């Protein structure tokens, strides 16, 4: 069709030229008219724009353009044939400078046209322009279909080269039109050419001298206007072969006398083998024989002659240790080298005795005077000190009358259930700022001693200060002790802590009080707070409120150098739930209210607080929030556990919650049930004791408290006062928020041996009592009576169940006779430990390893922040924005890990996480060996150190 139209146009032009020859006058007039419009008669068309070579991408047509001056007409000719006029798009305008006509023509070429053309050369097009004097042709423009095949003709191959060796990676890109350009990537970052790296040599990558930093994953990237193609990744490992260091000096001979052995050593550290490099060949230790000279003991020579008798009636003689002389470490001669004798035949004897008596009496007189002076000085000093109050610091009293106990005995099974035939002594009370776990025979001997243990310190107060602790010889891990007799609120001058209005009454008990803790009675308007305190410095430490599940970790470096803070933690026992909880949200207090301070505390990194809670969080039926008390005693919401926050961090676990806090104050966890399936854990326990008013009576008391160590501690303290016995190991009941009550019943009581009060076999607590039981434990009592004094055993079951909910059975089997009764020291908990630890003893991770981990993972790399990967492997992978704003994210992550594992102290999980991190960068390569070695250079050394014993690490890094 195109050929036919071209032929028609060609014939039409010939006819027009022929008619122009037949009518010369008309043609002449026309030529003059055209000459005026198109210029002088000697000008041929000149192309201002010629068609360019083009590529068709996918199915998009391309445009070819021509522009000429002067031109009557412009037509395209493709592959030798004229393009139809209807396919031309023409524009015409006049050049303002020359007045000549400029014509512009454009056509579209489709993919189908190019594919349908079959010729010896590529598809081509050119322009033909006509003027009055003739025609002009443009250059040929080729039109090709662009593509890029998928497979590389040659992929780069991995290499292992020694340091300073040459690296050559070959790459032949896939076939394509136009030809693909090649770019090299190292760990997904472009590689540029410099004096050592050349990427311009025929698409190959050449590194003249390999460096350690050249190790990585290299990829060849080919691209053109159609697509980009990636080659297989080639892993390059630059290894270092080991080299020997210089020999050390020869050691001393291993024997003192005779033939022995001496040795010297060298290490493969010059350089150390790296990234799979070969180890040094040869011996690291050399041995050589040696001959040690035997020691020669000295011997006395002959005495010299006596000297002439002196005016003091004495004569002398001497001898020397030269027969033989002591050599090679031999012993010196025994005895005197100078001899003295009376040379007057006894005439000077009386004179000598009188002189000796005078010296003796003079010495005795001087001693008496010295003793009198000392007594007077001590008396004046004590009188002077008494005028200003008792504030004496005596290191001898510390070492002689008071010793800190930091041991912790191992408990087999439940530490609450042990047997003893002796009733506990409730008449002696002692206060331990660092309490002791008395759980074996040795501990019982310590606790059974009379108050003479503390008699040497009747009113002693120990002032703890960073500068003075050194003078007392107290190490950094020492604890603070306040032993007071009458005034619990008296503190040494300058060290009275600010407890922000929290009462301290009852926190320090005297030695002569009758009970250890007060009874637990709901009618008591005020219960003294549980507290602990300690002095911390730059090394950090840990505060623990024993048997409550509450602790505080102060990270290393959180306190400035040469600065100490007396920090404290207080558990509030007042009933403040009305101000803490929101009635609109039906909130429930899930944890104790914990305060830490002082308020002016200035730390450079957050502290980690651990609080136990009683919510069953596995089913996500709770909306748990962290609240803080403001200065006007109102409670404000700090954050929701499920939300992201940069002010604090909350890691919620099944039994407890770990908080990263930056501002001192009082905190508590509250929960809002989202459905009736919300579950609150209750701890059930049964205690028994004889009825004091009835010799045949026996009382069973069942407690339902929140499943937290702190709540059970209150029950244990109350039963300790009553002399009760724990009859069954406490059990956990899941109490649902379905508004149904809790029922308790006693079953299987021997009817012929025991009787129970009527209408008390089944008792019930309402839902509201149980659901809000966080402030006062619920107690249910069953009173039983024996028919005969011969009945000494009691066995029964107590059923505790929620209506349409879970049920637990407490099995009771006990002896009710005083001589046979088993006393259970239930007040001793398995997590009993010292209340404060300072320095490296407070942390599971040694300081040097902690610093090495932080230096490694706080550094940015091509894949982002390595601390994010560390957090992911330690299952701390939410709310990462909080760690991002910290100066050292890795240090804060490790503090949170320390808080999680403060009880177990298992470093294997941390070591496993570090090993897994080393394998992350090798997942994109078929070979994992070399990539793992490159990435885990630091983690391998760290995990190897973590495998050592705690004693070795403490000895090395203290």
Image: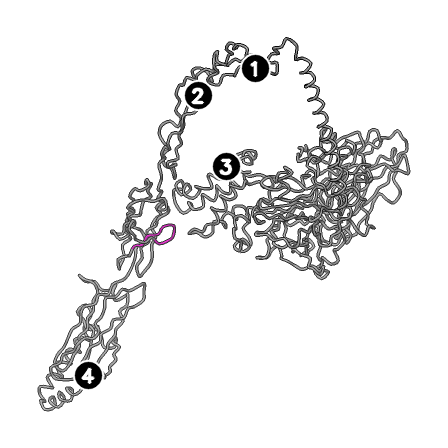
Q: Residues within 10 Å of mark 4 (few under 14, many from 20)?
A: few
Foreground mark, 2 or 4, reads 2
Disc 4 and disc 3: Cα gap in Å? 88 Å
- Residue 771 percent coordinates (x, y): 74, 52
Q: Nearer the viewer, residue 311 or 732?
A: 311
Q: Left or right: 99 with respect to 875?
A: left
In contact (CB < 8 Å): disc 4 and disc 1:
no
Foreground mark, 2 or 1, reads 1
Q: Pick whichever of labels 4 and 1 is earlier in the sequence.
A: 4
Highlighted range, magenta: 182-190
Disc 2 and disc 4: Cα gap in Å? 110 Å
Foreground mark, 4 or 1, reads 1
Q: Which residue is mark 3?
A: 945
Q: Which residue is mark 1?
A: 336
In contact (CB < 8 Å): disc 1 and disc 3:
no
Q: Nearer the viewer, residue 528 or 672?
A: 528
Tell me the tag on residue 253.
Answer: 2
| Magenta region, main secondary structure | strand
Disc 2 and disc 1: Cα gap in Å? 34 Å
Query: Residue 458's quadrant in the figure?
Result: top right
Q: Left or right: 777 with respect to 146?
A: right
């Amino acid at each position: 069709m195109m050929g036919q139209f071209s032929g028609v146009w060609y014939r039409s032009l010939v006819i027009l030229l022929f008619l122009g020859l037949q009518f010369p006058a008309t043609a002449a007039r026309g030529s003059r008219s055209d000459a005026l419009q198109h210029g002088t008669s000697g000008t041929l068309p000149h192309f201002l724009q010629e068609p360019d070579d083009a590529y068709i991408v996918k199915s998009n047509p391309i445009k070819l353009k021509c522009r000429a001056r002067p031109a009557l007409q412009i037509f395209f000719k493709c592959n030798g044939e004229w393009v139809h006029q209807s396919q031309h798009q023409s524009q015409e305008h006049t050049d303002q400078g020359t007045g000549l006509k400029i014509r512009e023509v454009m056509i579209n070429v489709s993919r189908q046209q190019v594919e349908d053309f079959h010729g010896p050369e590529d598809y081509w097009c050119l322009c033909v322009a006509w003027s009055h004097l003739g025609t002009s042709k443009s250059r040929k423009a080729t039109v090709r279909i662009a593509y890029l095949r998928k497979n590389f003709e040659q992929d780069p191959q991995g290499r292992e080269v020694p340091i300073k060796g040459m690296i050559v990676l070959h790459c032949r890109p896939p076939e394509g039109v136009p030809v693909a350009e090649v770019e090299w990537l190292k760990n997904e970052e472009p590689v540029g050419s410099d004096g050592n790296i050349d990427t311009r040599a025929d698409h190959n990558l050449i590194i003249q001298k390999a460096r350690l930093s050249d190790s990585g994953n290299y990829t060849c990237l080919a691209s053109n206007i159609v697509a980009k193609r990636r080659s297989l990744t080639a892993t390059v490992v630059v290894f270092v072969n080991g080299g020997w260091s210089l020999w050390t000096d020869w050691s001393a001979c291993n024997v003192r006398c005779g033939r022995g052995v001496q040795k010297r050593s060298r290490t493969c550290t010059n350089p150390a083998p790296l990234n799979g490099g070969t180890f040094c060949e040869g011996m690291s230790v050399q041995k050589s024989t040696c001959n040690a000279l035997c020691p020669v003991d000295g011997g006395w020579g002959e005495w010299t002659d006596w000297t002439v008798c002196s005016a003091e009636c004495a004569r002398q003689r001497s001898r020397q240790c030269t027969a033989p002389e002591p050599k090679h470490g031999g012993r010196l001669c025994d005895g005197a080298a100078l001899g003295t004798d009376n040379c007057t035949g006894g005439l000077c004897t009386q004179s000598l005795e009188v002189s000796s008596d005078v010296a003796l009496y003079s010495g005795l007189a001087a001693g008496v005077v010295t003793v009198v002076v000392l007594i007077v000085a001590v008396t004046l000093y004590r009188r002077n000190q008494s005028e200003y109050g008792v504030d004496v610091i005596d290191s001898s009293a510390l070492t002689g009358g008071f010793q800190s106990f930091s041991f912790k005995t191992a408990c087999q099974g439940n530490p609450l259930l042990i047997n003893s035939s002796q009733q506990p002594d409730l008449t002696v009370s002692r206060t331990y700022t660092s309490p002791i776990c008395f759980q074996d025979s040795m501990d019982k001997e310590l606790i059974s001693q009379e108050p003479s243990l503390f008699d040497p310190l009747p009113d002693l107060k120990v002032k703890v200060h960073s500068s003075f602790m050194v003078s007392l010889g107290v190490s950094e891990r020492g604890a603070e002790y306040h032993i007071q007799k009458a005034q619990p609120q008296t503190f040494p001058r300058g060290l009275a802590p600010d407890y922000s209005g929290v009462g301290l009454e009852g926190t320090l008990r005297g030695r002569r009080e009758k009970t250890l803790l007060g009874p637990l009675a709901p009618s008591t308007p005020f219960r003294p707070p549980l507290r602990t305190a300690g002095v911390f410095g730059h090394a950090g430490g840990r505060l623990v409120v024993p048997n409550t599940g509450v602790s505080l970790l102060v990270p290393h470096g959180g306190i400035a150098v040469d600065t100490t803070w007396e920090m404290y933690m207080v558990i509030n026992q007042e009933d403040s739930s009305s101000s803490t909880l929101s009635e609109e949200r039906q909130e429930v207090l899930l944890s104790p209210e914990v305060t830490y301070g002082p308020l002016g505390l200035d730390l450079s990194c957050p502290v980690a607080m651990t609080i136990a809670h009683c919510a069953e969080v596995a089913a996500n039926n709770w909306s748990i929030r962290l609240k803080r008390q403001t200065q006007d005693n109102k409670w404000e919401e700090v954050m929701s556990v499920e939300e992201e926050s940069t002010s604090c961090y909350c890691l919620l676990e099944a039994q407890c919650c770990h908080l990263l806090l930056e501002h001192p104050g009082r905190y508590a966890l509250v929960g809002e049930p989202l459905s009736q399936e919300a579950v609150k854990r209750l701890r059930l326990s049964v205690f028994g004791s004889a009825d004091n008013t009835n010799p045949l009576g026996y009382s069973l008391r069942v407690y339902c408290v929140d499943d937290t160590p702190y709540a059970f501690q209150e029950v244990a303290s109350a039963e300790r006062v009553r002399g009760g016995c724990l009859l069954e190991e406490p059990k956990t009941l899941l109490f649902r928020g379905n508004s149904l009550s809790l029922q308790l019943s006693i079953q299987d009581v021997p009817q012929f041996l025991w009787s129970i009060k009527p209408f008390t076999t089944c008792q019930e607590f309402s839902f509201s009592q149980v659901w809000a039981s966080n402030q006062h434990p619920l107690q249910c009592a069953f009173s039983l009576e024996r028919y005969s004094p011969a009945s000494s055993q009691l066995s029964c079951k107590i059923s505790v169940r929620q209506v349409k909910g879970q049920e637990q059975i407490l099995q009771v089997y006990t002896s009710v006779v005083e001589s046979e009764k088993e006393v259970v020291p239930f007040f001793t908990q398995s997590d009993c430990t010292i209340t404060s630890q300072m320095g490296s003893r407070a942390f599971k991770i040694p300081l040097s390893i902690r610093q090495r981990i932080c230096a490694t993972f706080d550094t940015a790399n091509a894949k982002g922040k390595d601390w994010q990967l560390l957090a992911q492997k330690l299952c701390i992978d939410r709310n990462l924005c909080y760690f991002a704003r910290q100066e050292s994210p890795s240090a804060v992550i490790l503090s949170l890990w320390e808080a999680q594992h403060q009880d177990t102290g298992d470093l294997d999980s941390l070591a496993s996480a570090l090993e897994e991190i080393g394998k992350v960068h090798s997942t994109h390569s078929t070979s994992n060996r070399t990539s793992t070695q490159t990435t885990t250079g630091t983690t391998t050394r760290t995990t190897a150190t973590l495998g050592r014993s705690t004693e070795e690490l403490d000895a090395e890094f203290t």
